[in-house]
């Protein structure tokens, strides 16, 4: 049997790149080729494979033309419309093939009764490369056998072309009855577009839909669409500033623009978006903004579909650099091309949010929108009587509004006073007021920024105990915050291209302020034990709040953002009325805002030298309190559950230990009392233990254990240690789920030895487990008590526990020496992780000043499966003993710190040996494909830092 000859190129699609394509000519070519295929075949069924081949060739060639045009700098909407037009011609060609050769109508008038309508996204006349095709086969009063056969044959051909087709066959009456009870069907019909068949029947559908549905159900439809939007956004991620946004379904994405148009089309009875200007809903400038947003989002979506080869809607870390290159972004002024691209994306998402507010305000004015929906969109409020309202302001629908844009021209301070007043009165802002602010941003100039009253109002807003975060967010969304504090404007919509931060920089700063406000108000009970004794004793709230607002304000600059942020604080604080001493404290907080987190997570805080060095930086108890609270809020605002119990306990211990040094040996809670309290907490929980049992057990742990461990872990460890068999070597590998961190927790108890941590890490690597954190302890009787936190693989807990059980079993075998770790790792195929999208230069720091008895080795670089094993294995081969290890990950970046001694128990002072350590550890990253761009400082840090 001879191989099938591939179809020859289509003349209509063979023009030079960028040349217009005559799709009608393509349809004629298809008709001719289909006719030839049917003429040469003995039966229509025999011709079908060749017909499908011709149609597939036309589809593939047309998509190639669209892709080439897009990747040569073409527009996204033009690409989407071309693909829709291409689909139109294919469906018409398929219909002609079916009606002429497969199911020929016996009655000449019969075929006119079948009408094919494009609905949904396809009905809009724009298709992304991976979009579904939504079709309505519109029937006369009842289905005919011929019509049913034709519709079925068309669908089979489309499926043979591997297209995703949504379809329905309904009469007009059935369309109406379904639309009355199903908002999704109603929405698809709003976008109905005639493809072929009986045009009169289609017009009858539109008229009936308008008369029976659109004229009577506007309020219901608007409420349902906005409710649907809320649910969709909640699924995709409630913030429009999530750093891996969903281009279609996410907040500020294409679906939001579609929803606005559906609602406006339904309420204002327009057919095209441009008609909304004549209807008075949008100004010409706002309509242009709508079109720019739509064009940008369509460009991103089409590029994303072509680049991935599927209907991928999530702009993942892996895809962001590829799209930044495709769309022509370049590195500039401290921002990489991917960060510039994503900043543009988030600014567009913000613009979509602004347009949402405009439409919703107009709908409420027409009373076409249920009130409860509006409250969810723009904030709840307290119903109250407003007395002595300033003359430039009014209250509309229980929302603060202005008496017109002229109030900003009369007194530009009103641009700040509006937000201050909303917070003072506890009222949400009316969208018309927000719209007015956006139109008057030019009035926030150098004179207003220097105005004492404007600065006083802003500071009062920042320090308010009412609605600080939500009002500042509205101020940011209008652009007023970035104009009033220009350095803040530089980080608006700025993403940090890493897996650690969940939000853009401006959103992170606002969430940090919200976390502090919630902590003060007691709205975060999980953190109250941490801050209950500390936060009320802070002497100057405004220093803390402004330091928190500014701590990341210099992100995206060439210089260190902590140093650059300090300079921003030194310039801004006097403008806001801060005294010189207050200014210096804010600047110090910004400069050192990362220091407490780094020391707590990457240093041995049971080592007195660590505490002395940290105390020398902090210098005062007041600064310690400020930095502690700022650090908690900073970590809490990174993303959900990032501030977990372990980090909180480390920070709290560092605070208490440093408080003793700075207080001249005195602390609100000294170390001895804290150890006693920790033991008493466990003793109370183990009420069935005898005093002798408990005392014997408690004596097995050193002070560091009692200071660092929370009660759930202490209970778990007590049970595991008490259940150890006495007739064989101690060995336990137990598994649990840490739901707060979304991780799997492995607890290992074994006889301590030099290569134990390396063996555990190697067994995890051989099992395909990625270690994200590790807590290492040794008991007084020589047992290692190690807790290893690993990434989850499965969504359901039951699946994850089964996987954890397999890992624990493998660990037990490895610890008994039944597995050769190195061979097991080599046998495992390398896995590609999300972190592979990033490039991080590895760094190895060796310091003898950080500990009185150990050399400290800090290794940072791109995290990957098996990294901890490779590091610990290399350290062991270098004849070093690991006294303690501090394993942390910040998204894709691993930062692992090892306190080591040589085999004689001494530090490593020899420069040549330090050089060998550094080379061996750097080589681990180089062998994984990272470039050798590591920074290896000549100084080894033998002297204390100044």
Image (spheres, helix red, strand yellow):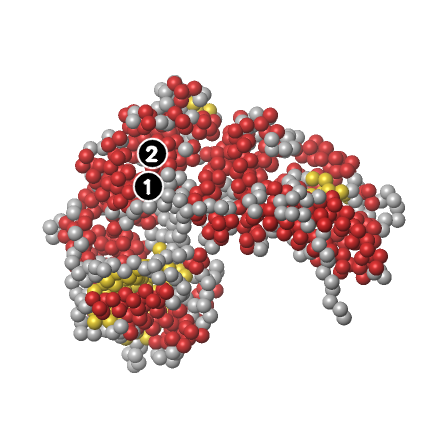
Q: Nearer the viewer, residue 854 or 223?
A: 854
- The residue that appears at 28% across and 52% down in the rendered structure is 597
The alpha-carbon separation of the residues under discs 1 and 2 comes to 10 Å
| Mark 1 secondary-structure assignment | loop
Q: Please identify the quarter of the rendering in which residue 791 is found.
A: bottom left
The residue carrying mark 2 is: 485
Residue 129 as seen in the image, left or right of residue 137: left
In this view of the protein, can residue 700 be seen by the observer? no
The residue carrying mark 1 is: 553
Residue 417 as seen in the image, left or right of residue 110: left
Q: Nearer the viewer, residue 798 or 201?
A: 201
Residue 794 as seen in the image, left or right of residue 410: right
- In the rendering, at what x and y percent does residue 283 appear? 54, 27
- The residue that appears at 42% across and 58% down in the rendered structure is 835
| Mark 2 secondary-structure assignment | loop
Q: Nearer the viewer, residue 353 or 836?
A: 836
Residue 862 as seen in the image, left or right of residue 162: left
Q: Is residue 905 above or below residue 601?
A: below
- In the rendering, at what x and y percent does residue 733 appear? 36, 71
Task: Tell how many labels.
Answer: 2
- In the rendering, at what x and y percent does residue 644 appear? 34, 54
Upstream in sequence: badge 1 or badge 2: 2
- The residue that appears at 61% across and 29% down in the rendered structure is 275
In this view of the protein, can residue 36 be seen by the observer? yes
In the rendered image, the quadrant that contains the N terminus is bottom right
Q: Are marks 1 and 2 in contact (CB under 8 Å)?
A: yes
Q: Which mark is residue 230?
A: none
Q: Is residue 354 above or below residue 851?
A: above
- The residue that appears at 40% across and 60% down in the rendered structure is 743
- In the rendering, at what x and y percent does residue 935 appear? 29, 58
Q: Please identify the quarter of the rendering in which residue 931 is found.
A: bottom left
């Amino acid at each position: 049997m001879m191989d099938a000859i591939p179809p020859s190129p289509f003349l209509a699609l063979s023009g030079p790149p960028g040349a217009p394509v005559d799709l009608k000519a393509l349809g004629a070519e298809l008709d001719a080729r289909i006719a030839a295929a049917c003429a040469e075949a003995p039966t229509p069924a025999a011709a079908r494979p060749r017909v499908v081949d011709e149609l597939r060739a036309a589809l593939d060639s047309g998509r190639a033309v669209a892709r080439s045009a897009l990747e040569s700098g073409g527009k996204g909407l033009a690409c989407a419309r071309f693909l829709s037009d291409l689909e139109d011609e294919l469906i018409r060609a398929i219909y002609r093939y079916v009606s002429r050769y497969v199911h020929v109508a016996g009655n000449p008038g019969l075929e006119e009764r079948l009408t094919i309508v494009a609905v949904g996204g396809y009905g809009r006349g724009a298709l992304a490369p991976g979009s579904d095709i939504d079709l309505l086969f519109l029937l006369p009063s009842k289905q005919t056998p011929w019509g049913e056969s034709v519709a079925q044959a068309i669908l089979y051909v489309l499926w043979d072309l591997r297209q995703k087709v949504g379809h329905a066959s309904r009469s007009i009456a059935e369309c109406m009855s379904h639309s009355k009870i199903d908002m999704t069907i109603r929405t698809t019909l709003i976008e109905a577009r005639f493809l072929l068949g009986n045009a009169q029947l289609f017009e009858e559908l539109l008229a009936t839909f308008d008369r029976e549905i659109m004229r009577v159900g506007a309020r219901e439809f608007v409420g349902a669409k906005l409710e649907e939007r809320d649910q969709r956004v909640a699924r995709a991620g409630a913030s429009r500033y999530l750093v891996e946004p969903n281009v279609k379904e996410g907040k500020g994405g294409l679906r939001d623009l579609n929803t606005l148009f559906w609602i406006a089309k339904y309420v204002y009875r327009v057919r095209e978006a441009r008609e909304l200007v004549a209807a008075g809903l949008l100004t010409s400038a706002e309509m242009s903004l709508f079109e720019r947003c739509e064009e940008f989002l369509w460009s991103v979506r089409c590029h994303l579909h072509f680049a991935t080869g599927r209907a991928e809607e999530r702009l993942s870390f892996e895809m962001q650099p590829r799209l930044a290159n495709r769309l022509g972004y370049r590195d500039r002024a401290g921002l990489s091309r991917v960060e510039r691209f994503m900043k543009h994306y988030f600014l567009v998402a913000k613009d979509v949010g602004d347009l949402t507010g405009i439409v919703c305000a107009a709908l409420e004015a027409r009373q076409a929108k249920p009130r409860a929906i509006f409250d969810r969109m723009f904030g709840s409020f307290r119903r109250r009587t407003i007395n002595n309202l300033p003359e430039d302001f009014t209250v509309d629908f229980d929302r603060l509004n202005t008496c017109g844009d002229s109030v900003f021209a009369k007194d530009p301070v009103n641009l700040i006073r509006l937000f201050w007043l909303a917070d003072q009165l506890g009222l949400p802002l009316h969208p018309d007021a927000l719209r007015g602010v956006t139109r008057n941003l030019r009035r926030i100039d150098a004179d207003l920024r220097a105005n004492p009253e404007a600065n006083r109002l802003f500071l009062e807003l920042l320090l308010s105990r009412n609605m600080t975060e939500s009002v500042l967010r509205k101020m940011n969304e209008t652009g007023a915050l970035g104009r009033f504090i220009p350095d803040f404007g530089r980080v608006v919509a700025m993403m940090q291209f890493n897996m650690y931060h969940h939000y853009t920089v401006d959103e992170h700063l606002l969430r940090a302020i919200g976390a502090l406000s919630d902590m003060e108000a007691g709205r975060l009970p999980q953190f109250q034990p941490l801050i209950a004794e500390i936060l009320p004793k802070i002497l100057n709230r405004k220093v803390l709040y402004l330091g928190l607002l500014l701590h990341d304000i210099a992100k995206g600059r060439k210089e260190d953002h902590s140093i650059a942020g300090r300079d921003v604080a030194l310039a801004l604080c006097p403008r806001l009325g801060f005294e010189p001493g207050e200014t210096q404290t804010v600047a110090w907080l910004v400069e050192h805002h990362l220091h407490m987190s780094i020391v707590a997570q990457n240093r041995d805080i049971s080592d007195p030298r660590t505490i002395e060095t940290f105390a020398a930086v902090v210098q005062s108890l007041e600064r310690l309190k400020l930095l502690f609270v700022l650090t908690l809020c900073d970590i809490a605002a990174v993303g959900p559950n990032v501030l977990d119990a372990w980090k909180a306990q480390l920070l709290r211990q560092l605070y208490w230990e440093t408080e003793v040094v700075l207080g001249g040996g005195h602390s609100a809670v000294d170390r001895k009392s804290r150890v006693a309290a920790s033991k008493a907490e466990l003793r109370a929980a183990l009420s069935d233990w005898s005093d002798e049992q408990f005392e014997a057990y408690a004596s097995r742990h050193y002070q560091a254990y009692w200071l660092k461990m929370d009660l759930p872990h202490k209970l778990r460890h007590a049970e595991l240690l008490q259940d150890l068999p006495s007739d064989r070597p101690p060995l336990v590998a137990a598994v649990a789920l840490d739901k707060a961190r979304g991780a799997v927790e492995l607890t290992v108890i074994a006889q301590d030895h030099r290569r134990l941590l390396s063996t555990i890490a190697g067994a995890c690597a051989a099992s395909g487990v990625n270690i994200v954190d590790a807590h290492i302890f040794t008991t007084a009787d020589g047992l290692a008590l190690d807790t290893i936190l690993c990434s989850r693989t499965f969504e359901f807990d039951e699946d994850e526990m089964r996987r954890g059980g397999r890992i624990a079993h493998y660990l037990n075998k490895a610890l008994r020496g039944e597995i050769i770790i190195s061979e097991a790792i080599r046998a495992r195929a390398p896995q590609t992780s999300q972190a592979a999208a990033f490039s991080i230069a590895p760094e190895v720091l060796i310091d003898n000043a950080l500990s009185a008895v150990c050399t400290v080795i800090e290794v940072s670089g791109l995290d990957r499966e098996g990294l901890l094993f490779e590091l610990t294995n290399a350290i062991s081969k270098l004849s070093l003993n690991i006294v303690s290890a501090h394993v942390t990950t910040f998204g894709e970046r691993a930062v692992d710190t090892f306190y080591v001694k040589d085999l004689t128990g001494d530090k490593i002072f020899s420069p040549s040996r330090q050089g060998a350590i550094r080379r061996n550890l750097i080589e681990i990253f180089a062998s994984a494909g990272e470039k050798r761009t590591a920074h290896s400082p000549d100084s080894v840090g033998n002297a204390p830092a100044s």
